[in-house]
Amino acid sequence: MADFPPVPLTLEGASALHQFFRFDWTAWRACGESERQSILAEITTTLNALEKAPDGKVHTALFSQLGHKGDLVLVHFRDTLEALNQVELALAQTEFYGFLDQRHSYVSVVELGLYESTRKTYEAASAKGFEQHSPEWNAEVEASLERGAAAMAPRLWPGVPESKYLCFYPMDRKRDEQKNWYSVPFAERQRMMHEHGMIGRRYGDRVKQIISGSIGYDDWEWGVDLFADDPVVFKKLIYEMRFDEVSADYALFGQFFIALRLPIANLGNWLSGSLA
């Protein structure tokens, strides 16, 4: 692999937007009951229209956030960035939006890293005598990516899982004088990522993970969504991964956000002080 391009191939799918809001409780309580009901009816209609894709997948989900970082989280998956921007604009037209203070957001695209198949693809192209980045080489790579995209379509174009809890965090790979992930030989990165992935697979029956790439989109390199019905599993999974070489030596983490699924039909109860 020393003579092959150092960059692993990736597959990209749905565009993703995470929105984190503080809710203005003081302004809300100052409204009369009839006004509150009108505002609630409008935002409920808007959220219901945004929630489901034509194929039935949930592609907008609402969460009640824990801690001081905010009150509400919206997670959106769409086919394009334009569609995500339209979601933002639709929400901004509602009266309810006037009670929201967006404290944080994250833009990314669902990504599958292909360390294993990258090596096979490059070796196959080389075995056929194709020069790197020649039209023949590029066609071989593109055909491999098209096969992978078809096989991985459910993972590339996900709905928001119907789990009770969400954990979201951004992360980088280190690139400093002591540790620089991007200068590590491909084969070593492949080995470390394989071992890293094996940990995640052991939790696959309890945690749904969606990785999204954000290089060139946002301030970190990746965003990680974890969905589960038992929030303790987030702690166990992330803690175990801290002992893994790729995380222990090369990972940097941003803020963590944790939230509970809030069905749109229960938003009125939430506004009255109840999750039920």
Image: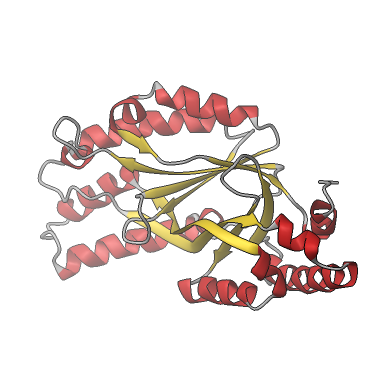
Residue 177 in sight from this viewpoint: yes
Q: Is residue 204 left or right of residue 138?
A: right
Residue 137 location, quadrant: bottom left
Most foreground residue, 104 or 250: 104
Q: Residue furthest right?
A: 34
Q: Is residue 268 left or right of residue 233?
A: right
Residue depicted at 56% across the width and 56% down the height: 154
Residue depicted at 52% across the width and 61% down the height: 17
Residue depicted at 13% across the width and 66% down the height: 134
Residue 216 location, quadrant: bottom left
Q: Position of residue 41 (x, y in %)?
A: 83, 71
Residue depicted at 29% across the width and 33% down the height: 250
Q: Where is residue 192 in the image (x, y as percent from the top left)?
A: 31, 31
Q: In this view, does 184 lie to the left or right of 202?
A: left
Most foreground residue, 43 or 245: 43
Q: In this view, does 92 lie to the left or right of 2?
A: right
Most foreground residue, 153 or 78: 78
Residue 48 location, quadrant: bottom right
* Image quarter hosting the N terminus: top left
Residue 52 in sight from this viewpoint: no
Q: Position of residue 234 (x, y in %)?
A: 57, 31
Q: Where is residue 38 in the image (x, y as percent from the top left)?
A: 84, 74
Q: According to the image, what is the colour scheme of the structure?
A: secondary structure
Most foreground residue, 272 or 266: 272
Residue 107 sits above or below residue 185 on the image = below
Residue 107 sits above or below residue 116 on the image = below
**Number of numbered callouts drawn:** 0
